[in-house]
Image (cartoon, rainbow, N blue to C red):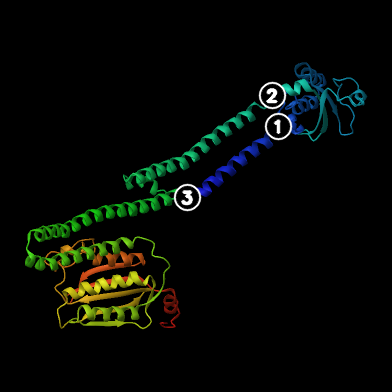
């Protein structure tokens, strides 16, 4: 991953290294004798040129070299041999005067020394005295290229910092724009598609934001669809109530006695519909603290409830001992109860409703199967949507049972799959994560624990 952290870290270290290196270079150029001897035009080639002329026997030419440097650069030179004896007439008076103590006054020149060995093997000691005005003037001109290098480095660092800043701020601006669009429900995932392809932290953030935006848009869309479906579903029982009330107003005493049960029935239907709508809405609210749920007692309770409401149906429960999940009992009970009620509506008498629970890959799969006619393949993908009822099926329900079951299972971190069974009938399968203790026991091979 091209980490943004390392990019910023390397940029700061590069800036520090360049500034430190140039600072050392400028300090070296400004203060070191060796730098002045190697770079100053009056001194740089003097030792080599003078030694070549002197060793050739041209003593006058060698002296002329020293005089010419004095005229051009105000440079005074004294040359000594290996025994510190003068070889030429110095250009600054007597030797003792050169070393004379000046008390507390600083000398008006800088003294530099250079030891030079010629190709013939002779060693010479050059003593230079360069006036400070001449040295300062040379420094100003000689430091032009280091200052130019510093300016170039600053320009490069500025451009690099600008690119680094843009690489951070531009994606953040796109994210800010995406947040604004999401707040106005006009968010488009394509607006962050290019940013999501980045390999750094901003790319990961864009991917997570896309998933969040997709989820929020799905929730907003589902809520809007739910409101439309609720208004549509409530309109029918309300219309029937209005008709029944209008008939009651015009009916006689005997007719009213006949119509009152119909009004009661329509009120019960409306109350049941509102209860299911509220149950579906409550699934999106905070359910409180979750805890361990033993499945066997829960299924036994639901089986007894089903015997009261559907005495003609038989429910066969096949579950591993100690099977449990982590969640909210009321929510999970409502989900399984809705699946059992849905199966009881379509299961023919004499055939059992089969309930099985098996663990696999740290997951618990609980299935509810009936032996009814099943559902047409083109309608399977719409099952579980609020208020959807497959055509040709018993229309006594409101189309919310499977939607409630699916939403409840998703709140438990699982999923609900609906399909026709290969041997006939219909099967609903809940895929739920095992409770933590069951995962540990499955991993260690210690068996199921109640």
Q: Is residue 163 above or below residue 288?
A: above
Rendered location of residue 194, percent (x, y): 37, 45
Q: Nearer the viewer, mark 1 or mark 3?
A: 3
Is residue 320 left or right of 21 when viewed as pictured?
A: left
For label 2, the residue is 140
User: Which residue is at 42% across, 41% downward?
Assistant: 173
Q: Quadrant of residue 322?
A: bottom left
- Residue 393 visible here: no
Is residue 364 left or right of 277 when viewed as pictured?
A: right
For label 1, the residue is 29
Give whichever of discs 1 and 3 has the lower sequence position.
3
Q: Is residue 90 above or below residue 408?
A: above
Q: Quadrant of residue 61?
A: top right
Mark 3 touches mark 2? (CB < 8 Å)? no
Give whichever of discs 3 and 2 has the lower sequence position.
3
Rendered location of residue 218, percent (x, y): 30, 54
Separation of disc 3 and disc 2 at Cα?
Answer: 44 Å
Separation of disc 1 and disc 3 at Cα?
Answer: 39 Å
For label 3, the residue is 2
**10 Å crowding of disc 3: few (<14), some (14-19), many (20+):** few
């Amino acid at each position: 991953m091209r980490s943004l952290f390392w990019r910023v870290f390397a940029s700061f270290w590069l800036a520090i290294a360049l500034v430190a290196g140039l600072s050392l270079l400028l300090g070296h150029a400004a203060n070191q004798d060796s730098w002045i001897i190697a770079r100053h035009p009056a001194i740089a080639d003097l030792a080599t040129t003078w030694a070549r002329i002197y060793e050739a026997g041209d003593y006058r030419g060698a002296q002329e070299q020293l005089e010419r440097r004095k005229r051009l650069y105000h440079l005074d030179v004294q040359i000594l041999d290996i025994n510190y004896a003068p070889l030429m007439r110095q250009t600054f008076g007597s030797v003792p005067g050169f070393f004379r103590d000046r008390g507390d006054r600083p000398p008006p020149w800088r003294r530099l020394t250079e030891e030079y060995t010629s190709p013939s093997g002779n060693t010479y000691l050059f003593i230079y005295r360069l006036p400070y005005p001449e040295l300062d003037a040379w420094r100003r001109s000689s430091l032009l290229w280091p200052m130019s290098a510093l300016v170039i480095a600053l320009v490069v660092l500025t451009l690099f910092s600008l690119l680094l800043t843009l690489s951070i701020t531009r994606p953040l601006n796109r994210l800010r724009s995406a947040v604004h669009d999401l707040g106005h429900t006009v968010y488009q995932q394509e607006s962050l598609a290019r940013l999501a392809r980045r390999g750094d932290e901003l790319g990961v953030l864009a991917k997570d934001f896309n998933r969040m935006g997709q989820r929020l848009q799905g929730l907003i869309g589902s809520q809007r669809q739910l409101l439309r479906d609720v208004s549509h579903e409530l309109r029918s029982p309300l219309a029937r109530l209005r008709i029944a009330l209008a008939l009651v107003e015009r009916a006689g005493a005997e007719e009213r006695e006949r119509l009152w049960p119909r009004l009661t029935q329509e009120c019960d239907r409306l109350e049941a519909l509102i209860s299911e709508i509220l149950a579906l809405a409550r699934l999106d609210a905070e359910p409180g603290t979750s805890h361990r749920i033993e499945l066997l007692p829960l299924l036994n309770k639901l089986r007894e409830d089903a015997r009261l409401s559907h005495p003609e149906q038989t429910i066969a429960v096949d579950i591993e001992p100690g099977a449990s999940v982590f969640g909210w009992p009321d929510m999970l009970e409502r989900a399984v109860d809705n699946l059992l009620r849905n199966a009881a509506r379509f299961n023919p008498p004499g055939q059992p409703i089969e309930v099985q629970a098996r663990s696999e890959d740290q997951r618990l799969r609980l299935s509810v199967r009936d032996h009814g006619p099943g559902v047409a393949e083109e309608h399977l993908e719409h099952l579980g949507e609020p208020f959807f009822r497959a055509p040709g099926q018993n229309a006594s329900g409101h189309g919310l049972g499977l939607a409630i079951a699916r939403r409840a299972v998703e709140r438990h971190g699982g999923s609900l799959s609906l399909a026709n069974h290969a041997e006939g009938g219909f099967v609903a399968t809940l895929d739920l994560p095992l409770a933590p203790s069951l995962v540990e026991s499955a991993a260690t091979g210690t068996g199921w624990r109640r």
